[in-house]
Image (cartoon, rainbow, N blue to C red):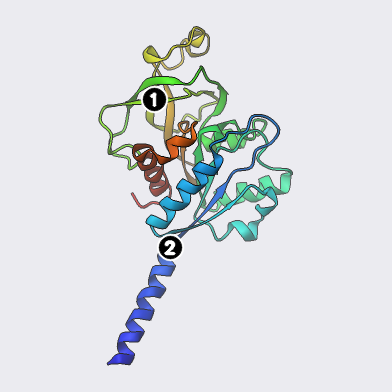
Amino acid sequence: MKYLSLLLIAFSLSCQTQQQKHILIYTKNGEGFVHDNIEASVNALKKLATENNYTTEATADPTFFTPKNLAKFDCIIFSNTNNEAFDNQAQRDAFQKYVQSGGGFVGIHSASGSERDWPWFWAMVGGKFVRHPALQPFEMKVFDQQNPATNFLGETWQWEDEVYYLDNLNPDIHVLLAADLRTVEDDSKDEFHRNRFGNYTPLAWVHQFDGGRQFFTALGHKPEYYSDQVFLKHLLGGIQWVLQED
């Protein structure tokens, strides 16, 4: 009986290990602005992962991007990457093939400003960063109250952040959150938004592109946001959607 109990315990632990999802947290920045939130974001993502039975690795080294290394991950999070996220085409090819093989992607904040000369990357993220007005409080409309990244919110969400303006939006994105531009102070916002989105500009979405599942949120500028429980729920819900745990 004791031997049988040990076998059952071993089997249970084996199943739990097999069910664990493996996440890569990537933070490479090329030449240009580098956020001071990276350490806070990595620590928060690692904590979320531990609490939800995921394993993580974190790196800012683009040489890590090889087919062999990426094959073990269920999701790659670009946490505040910016400008050139890769050093060469082989690294880009490895990442692209990872997505095309069904790998998940989560982009946080300035991830949308990464790889600005690579149209496939813009389409995969869902859009390409253009600019933002000064950091300020504003209101977002919640367009989807069913998605795990937003299902804990009401019809609107009051937040303070940089309101990212993005272009080259992929028409297949499913918008979760959009800033209400009537609550945004920016004297030149009409120059960008005229005849685009009406009173709203998308800030978070999900979609499925080129074989993979993707979640992007433009939120997350300040380091202290990564200890805000509502924002962390937003991030975790997006990760869960990408991992098909929704």
Q: Quadrant of residue 35?
A: top right
Amino acid type, label 2: Gln
Residue at figure coordinates x 47%, y 31% from the top left: 218
* Residue that numbered label 2 is attached to: 20
Residue at figure coordinates x 50%, y 42% from the top left: 40
| Residue 92 in the image: above or below residue 120 | below
- Residue 185 position in % (x across, y down): 44, 12
Residue at figure coordinates x 40%, y 43% from the top left: 238
Label 2: which secondary element: loop
- Residue 204 position in % (x across, y down): 42, 32
Label 1: which secondary element: strand
Residue at figure coordinates x 39%, y 49% from the top left: 240
Q: Quadrant of the N terminus?
A: bottom left
* Residue that numbered label 1 is attached to: 178
- Residue 201 position in % (x across, y down): 43, 21
- Residue 167 position in % (x across, y down): 54, 23
Farthest right residue in view: 88
Q: Quadrant of residue 217?
A: top left
The front one of 168 and 158 is: 158
Quick check: 24 left or right of 3? right
Amino acid type, label 1: Ala
| Residue 52 in the image: above or below residue 203 | below
In space, the residues marked 2 and 1 are separated at their CA atoms by 33 Å
The front one of 219 and 174 is: 219
